[in-house]
Image (spheres, grey):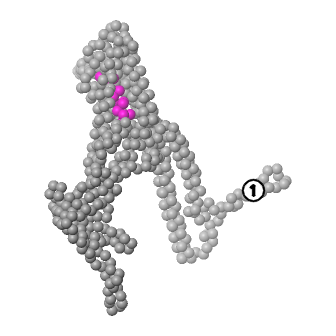
Amino acid sequence: MKKIDKLVLKSFWGPFVLTLCVVVFIFLMRLMMFYIDQFVSKDIELRVFAKILFYFSLITIPIALPLAVLLSSLMTYGNLGEFFELTALKSAGISLTRAMRPLLIVATGIALFSFWFNNKVAPWANLKGYSLLWDIKSSKATLSIKEGIFYNDLPGYSIKADKKDGETLRGMVIYKHQENGMETGNREIILADSGRMFTTPDKQYLVFELYNGNDYTEYTDNSSVSYASNGPQNPLAKFLRNGFQHYKLRISLDSYGLKRTDEQQFEYHEYMKNLKELSTLTDSLKKELKASLAGTAATSRQYYTYQFKQPPPVIVTNPSTPQPVVVRPGKWIDSLLARPADARIKGEVQEMALSQARNMLSYAESNQTYLKEKAKTVYRYELESHHKFTQAISCFIMFLIGAPLGAIIKKGGFGVPVLVSIIFFILLYVLTLTGDKYAKDGLIWVPAGAWMANATLLPLGLYLMKQARNDSRLFDKDVYVIWWERIKKRYASRRAARTETKIA
C-alpha cells in the first residue's frame, strides 16, 4: 500500500466510525423518546434494557451507513483540499481519480457488507428486537398505590391506603373478588390499621404484611332458610369476622412479569425475512392474488337471478360430418316480462331487484377491499426485497457525492461538511419514504418506487465527480458574484442600446 492510500484511509476511518456511532445513538434516542412511557412505567431489568438497545442498534446500522460514508468521505477530501494536499498531489501528476481509488474500494466493500448485513443480521435483529419490544409493551405497569384511591390492576383484588408514610401504609382496605361457581362479588374484606408492601426476592409474589385489623368473610349458611308467605326463599348470607394483630397476604405476580412471546408469531413480517424467503413468499402471494382475481367473476354469479344462468353450449356429434357441431341455446327470456302487470307483483320484483343490487354492491366493495389489501401485501414483500439492494447501493452513491463535494468545497472539520451531509441524507431519506409510500399503495411500479432515491442521486453524484475532476469552482462565492455582475452589465448595455434607438 502506498503512502497516499494510507493517508486517505487514515483520514477516512476516524470520521466514519464516529459518525456511525453518533447516528446510531440518535436513532436510539428517537426510540427512547417514542417509547419512554413504556420503559419508565415498567419494572424492566437492566439486562432486558441492554438487550433491546443492542437489537435496535443493529437495526439502525443499515440506515446509518450511507450517512457515515457521505460525511466521512466529504471530510476526508475536504481536509485534503483545505490544507492544499490535493493541490500537491495534482502538481505531482496524481489525478483526483487516483486519490479517490482507495476510498472507492472501501465504499464498494461497505456496500457489500451492507447487503450481507441486511440479508442476514437485520432480519434476526428485527425479530428479536420487535418481539422483545412487544413483550415490554404488553407487560403491566409497576404496582403503585396512591393515597385514598383504589388500585384495581391486581387480578381479583382492590386495594386502598388512606395514607402513605414512607414504606408504611395506614388505613388499609383490601377487597377480594371471588368467583366460585354462581357466586361472584366481594366475598372477603380485610381492614387493617397499618401495613407494608414488598415483593419476594424472586419477584414472583407480592406480600402485604398487615397489623391490627379484621378479616370479614361472607359465606352462605344452607341450613338457615328464610320463609315468606309464598314458601321458602334463598339461604341466608352470614359474615365471619376474624381479628388479627399480624397477618400476611401473599398475591401472585404472574400477570406483572415480563413473559416472552413465541417469536414465530412475528416471523410473518417482511422485515424478519431474508432475500430467499422474501422471493418465495412474494411468488406465493402473487399466485394467491391471481387466483383470487380469477375467481371473482365465478363467485359473483350467486348474486344474480337471471344473468349467467344461460345453459352452456351443447356439443352434438353427427356421423355425416367429420367434426362435432356446437349448438348454442337461444337468448334467455326474463320470465318476469310474461307476468301480468299487477302492482303487487311489480313491487315484489322491484324489492327483489333492489335487494340483489345492494347485496352485489356490498360484495363488490368488500371484495375490492380484500383484493387491495392482498395486493398491498405483495407490494410490501416485493419492496423489502429491493431494499436489500437499494440500501447497499446508496452507500456507494453517497461516496460518489461526498468525495467530489469535499474536493470542490475544500472545507474539513464538522462545520460545512456536516451541514451538506445532513441535506443530502434528508433528501435520500425523503425520496426513499416517498417511493415506498407510492409503491405500497400501488400508485407506481414497485421497482420504480424502491429505486427512486438512488436513481435521483446517482446522476448528481456523477455530475459532481465530473466537476471535481475539472477543478470546478462550483461553490466559490466570487464565481457567482462575477456571473451576477456580467448579467447586470449585459442588461445595462441592452437598456442603453434600446434608449439610443428610441432617441434616433
Q: Quadrant of residue 71?
A: top left
Residue located at (22% from left, 60% from top): 209
Q: Outermost residue toward the bottom?
A: 229
Q: Is residue 307 visible?
A: yes
Q: Position of residue 418 (x, y in %)?
A: 27, 28
Question: Please, is residue 335 above or below residue 497 in the view?
Answer: below
Q: Secondary structure at mark 1?
A: strand
Q: Is residue 442 visible?
A: no
Magenta stretch, main secondary structure class: helix
Residue corresponding to mark 1: 315
Q: Quadrant of residue 63?
A: top left
> In the shown orientation, is residue 408 left or right of residue 380?
left
> In the shown orientation, is residue 477 left or right of residue 165?
right
Residues drawn in magenta: 60-75
Q: Position of residue 177 (x, y in %)?
A: 31, 68
Quarter of the image that includes the N terminus? top left
Q: Residues within 10 Å of mark 1 (few under 14, many from 20)?
A: few
Quarter of the image that includes the C terminus? top left
Question: Please, is residue 451 above or below residue 202 in the view?
Answer: above
Asked whether 64 falls inside the magenta stretch, the response is: yes
Q: Outermost residue toward the right?
A: 320
Q: Quadrant of residue 155?
A: bottom left
Q: Outermost residue toward the front?
A: 245
Give 435 or 212, whichever is nearer the viewer.
Answer: 212
> In the shown orientation, is residue 6 left or right of residue 277?
left
Q: Outermost residue toward the left?
A: 165
Residue located at (29% from left, 60% from top): 250
Residue located at (41% from left, 31% from top): 114
Q: Position of residue 146 (x, y in %)?
A: 20, 59
Give 363 or 493, whichever is nearer the viewer.
Answer: 363
